[in-house]
Amino acid sequence: MNNPLVTVKSVSKIYRRDSLEIPVLNNIHLQVPEGEFLALMGPSGSGKTTLLNLIAGLDRPSGGEINVGGIRIDSLKEKELARWRARNVGFVFQFYNLLPVLSAFENVELPLLLTGLSRKERADHVRFALKVVGLEDRMHHLPRQLSGGQEQRVAIARALVTDPKIILADEPTGDLDKVSAEEIMTLLSRLNLEYKKTIVMVTHDPRAAEKARVRRYLDKGELV
Amino acid sequence: MWVLRLIAKNAARHKLRTLLTVLGLAVAIVAFGVITTALNAWNTQIELIPPDRLVTRHAVSYTFSLPISYKDRIEQVPGVERVAYANWFGGLYQNDPKNFFANYAIGPENGIELYPEFVVPEDQKRAYYEDRTGCIAGQKIVDKFGWKIGDVIRLTGQIYPGDWDFTLRGIYRGAEVGTDETSLIFHWKYLDERIGQMYPGWSGQAGWFVVKIADPSASAAVCAAIDDLFRNSSAQTLTETEKAFTIGFISGLDAIIVMLKVISYLILGVIFLVLANTMLMSARERINEYTLLKTLGFGSFRVAGLIVGESLIIAALGGTIGILLTFPAADALGRAMSTFITVMAVKSGTLIMAMVFALLVGILSAVVPTIRALRISIVEGLRHIG
C-alpha cells in the first residue's frame, strides 16, 4: 500500500443552529493512499459531503485531525488554507460551477491566476488540460454553448490544471444523463490510472462507484 | 487584468438591468449638475455686484417708497460719493408673463453712471440722455426679442397701469462674464411725469436709492449714518449693501433653488437605493460564483473587488453619461431662463463633485452585497448551487 495522502483521525463534526446541535460526523478514521480512487457512498444526510469538505479544507472539524500530504489542514489559518487549497486540491462539483461569462479556456485558467505563471505558461497548461478532457476544440465556447457532459469535462480540466495532489469530486455524475455520466467516470478513471491522481469521490450512483478502486460507506455519520 | 475583464463581463450580464441603472444614475447626475450650475450662476451674479454700492429703501418694506428729497440729504453723509434713485416698473413686454425681464426707472438722467458693469457705447449713452422716453437694454434680451436701436418697445405696466412706449437708444453689455444682461432701464423722470398725471399724489417718490461710497470697508458706518438721518422721519430707511439688498429682494427665488438642490440630493439618494438594489440582486445571483472563487483559493480582497468593481463601473458609466448630458441640459435651461440666469456655465468643480457623488454611490451600493458575499461560508455558499 502507498503512503497515505489523506489521514483522517477521530474526526467529528457538529453543526450548530441556534441552540441546537446537529452531529453529522462521529469519530471518523480514514486513510486514503496516494494514487487511490475512493468512492464515498451512503444515503442522504450520512455525512459524505461534509467529510469531503473537511478533506478539501472547505470546513473545519469539531474534533480530530486531518492531515493531507503531510500538512495538518485543520490547524491552518483561513488565508493559509485558501493558499493550500489553490496549490493542492482540484474540485469537481455536481453542477460544474463554471462561471457563465467566461469561456471554457478562461474557466480552466482561473486556478492558474493564483500562481506565478506567465500568460504563455498558463495558456500551455490550459490547452494541455483541455486536451486531456478532449475539449481542445471547444476552448472558446461559453458554458451555455456546451452540453452538461462537456461542462463537467471543463470542470475536470479546471480541477487538474494546477496538477493538484488530490481531486475531490462531489456527485460528479449527479446532473448527467447515463452516457455523459459514463464518459465522466471513464475520464476520472483515466486521470487516476494514467496521471496517478488521487481521487476522492462522493456519489449516490452505484455505477459511478464501480469505477472507483475502493468504496467506503457512511451511515449516520459513521464509516461502516 | 482578469479581474477587470470579469468585472466588465459581469456588469454586461443583465444588459437591460445595467442600462436602466446607468440611465437612472445619469439622470440623477444631470439633475444635480444642472441645479448646482444654476445655483452657481445665481451666486456669480451676486458676487459681481460692486461692493461700493449701497441701497437705501423704506425700512418697512420694498413696496413702500421714499421721498425723492432724501437724495440731497443722503449725498451730505460723509463717505457718500454719488446718489441715484430707482423705481421697479414691472412692465411686461407684449403683456406676456413669459416675456418677463427686469425693468426699472433710474434717475437722475446720468444715474446709469453708477453701474460701471453695464457697458454702453458713448454715442448710445448720449442718445439715451437726450431722449425722455429712451431706454437702455441688455444684450441678452435685445437678442432674444430681436430688437435694434430705434425700435419702440411697448411694456404693459403691472404696477403702473397702461401701455408704456420706450425707444431703444442703447444696448449694454456686461463688463464681466456673468454680469446681468437682461434688464431694461429707462428715465425715472418719464415715469414720474406720467404718474403725476395719473395719480398726482404718487409723484416724487423713489423705490430705492443707489448710493456709491468712497470706501467699501466703511459701508457699515455709512449705512448707519444714512439710516440715522431719517430715524425720526415718517419714512424711516434701511440701508444695506446692494449685494444684501439683491439677495433679500429675490430671496423667494433663492429658497426655490435651495429646495431644488435638496431635491437633487434626494434624487441621488434614490439612485443610491436603486444601484444598491441592483448590486444586491447581482451579488445574490452570483453567490455560487463567489463561493467557487473562494473554494479555488481566491481571497476576500479579490472577491470584494469583483463586487465593488462592478458597482463602480456602473456608477462611473452613469456618472460619465450624466456629466456629458449636463452640458446640453444646462445650456437648454440657460436659454429657457435667460432672463433670470445670466450665464449657465458648468463649472469643473460641479463636474468633479458629480463624479465623486457617483463613485461614492457606487462604493456605498457595494458595501452590503460585499459583506454578505464575504460572510457566507464556503459550505453555506455551495448549498446555493444548483
Image (spheres, rainbow, N blue to C red):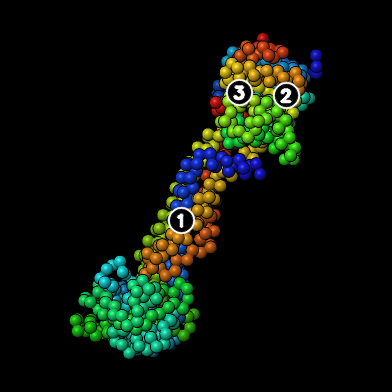
| Left or right of residue B70, residue B174 in this image | right
- Which residue appears at 55% of the width and 34% of the height? B286
**Helix, strand or loop status at disc 2:** strand
Q: Position of residue A40 (x, y in %)?
A: 66, 15
Marking on residue B336: none
N-terminal of the pair, mark 2 or mark 3, is 3
Evaluate whether label 2 is on the same chain as label 3: yes
Q: Nearer the viewer, residue B53 or B44?
A: B44
Amino acid at pointer 3: Gly
Q: Quadrant of residue B227?
A: bottom left
- Which residue appears at 58% of the width and 25% of the height? A147
Q: Chain of mark 2?
A: A
Is there any visible trace of residue B227 in the rendered image?
Answer: no
Amino acid at pointer 1: Val
Q: Residues within 10 Å of mark 1 (few under 14, many from 20)?
A: many
- Report the residue marked by disc 1: B30
Residue contact between numbered discs 2 and 1, judged by CB atoms under 8 Å: no
